[in-house]
Amino acid sequence: MNAPADPAVPTRDRIRAAALDLFGDRGYDGVSMAELAERVGVAKPSLYNYYASKEELLLDLVEEGIGQWAEFCMAPFERAASFERQLADHLRLVIDFARERPHVVAVFHHATTHVRGELAERVEAQVRATEERIRGRIHGRIEAALAAGELDAETAEDVHLFLGVFFHGLLFLQTDCPRQLPPTHARLEQLWRFLFRALSGRLPQESIRP
């Protein structure tokens, strides 16, 4: 039985929280709007006062999740430090984010790999627009690191591509295959050495630990 709704929490926020839990556990296709309404403690038609469709709800969760990830994980690139230090801190925060908010990561991963048709196109457009803004925040730092010889790559685009593949794969393992590998946070130093050596051709001088 669901706990009584907290009147201090707006209904829209309760819908989003319930959808995040349900979609994160069972996937988008595995949850009906009727189940969601029951979890929230409202009649099913009431959901449509807040979201026109289940698709709109998923898109809202994806946008909110990306925003949370950017705010939490991108902060190191705003601080004055070497790119090596910034990247080490970024990796640690990405792992922390996945541990603290696994459903956010799971919903994002599911939305970008499992939905089909027009909804998939809308998710892709949403993610692409947000990623462009994120890329813009660190493009200058990557260019400076390349110019200073910190990184062993041809272009900033090569670095962006590698980082995208690396972090997406890392988050996939944490959310979809958690029993197939030891806890990622216990292997941060090894992961950090692998990541930086792949980018620079040498082992890092900075530690992953703060």
Image (cartoon, rainbow, N blue to C red):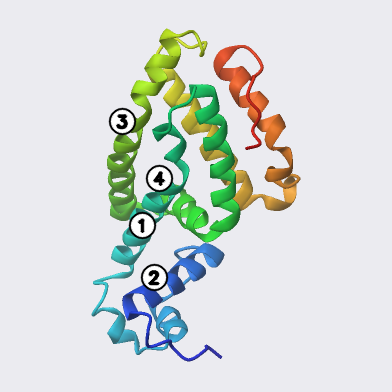
Q: Residue at x 29, y 85 (%)?
A: 46
Query: Alpha carbon of mark 3 to alpha carbon of mark 4: how far?
Result: 12 Å
**Quick one: quadrant of the N terminus?**
bottom right
Above/below status of 178 relative to 11? above
* Amino acid bearing label 3: Gly
Residue 149 in the figure: left or right of residue 70: right
Of residues 118 and 134, the one drawn nearer to the viewer in this rendering: 134
Q: Residue at x 42, y 25 (%)?
A: 160
Q: Are marks 1 and 3 in contact (CB under 8 Å)?
A: no
Q: Are marks 2 and 1 in contact (CB under 8 Å)?
A: yes
Of residues 136 and 124, the one drawn nearer to the viewer in this rendering: 136
Q: Residue at x 49, y 25 (%)?
A: 162
Q: Secondary structure at mark 3?
A: helix
**Which of the two discs, 2 and 1, labels the residue nearer the N terminus?**
2
Above/below status of 61 relative to 184? below
* Amino acid bearing label 2: Arg
Q: Residue at x 36, y 73 (%)?
A: 13
Q: Few, some or many C-alpha atoms within 10 Å of disc 2 (few <14, some 14-19, many ≥20)? A: some
**Which of the two discs, 2 and 4, labels the residue nearer the N terminus?**
2
**Which of the two discs, 3 and 4, labels the residue nearer the N terminus?**
4
| Residue linked to disc 4 | 70
**Which of the two discs, 4 and 1, labels the residue nearer the N terminus?**
1
| Residue linked to disc 3 | 136
Of residues 22 and 183, the one drawn nearer to the viewer in this rendering: 183
| Residue linked to disc 2 | 16
* Amino acid bearing label 4: Ala
Q: Few, some or many C-alpha atoms within 10 Å of disc 1 (few <14, some 14-19, many ≥20)? A: some
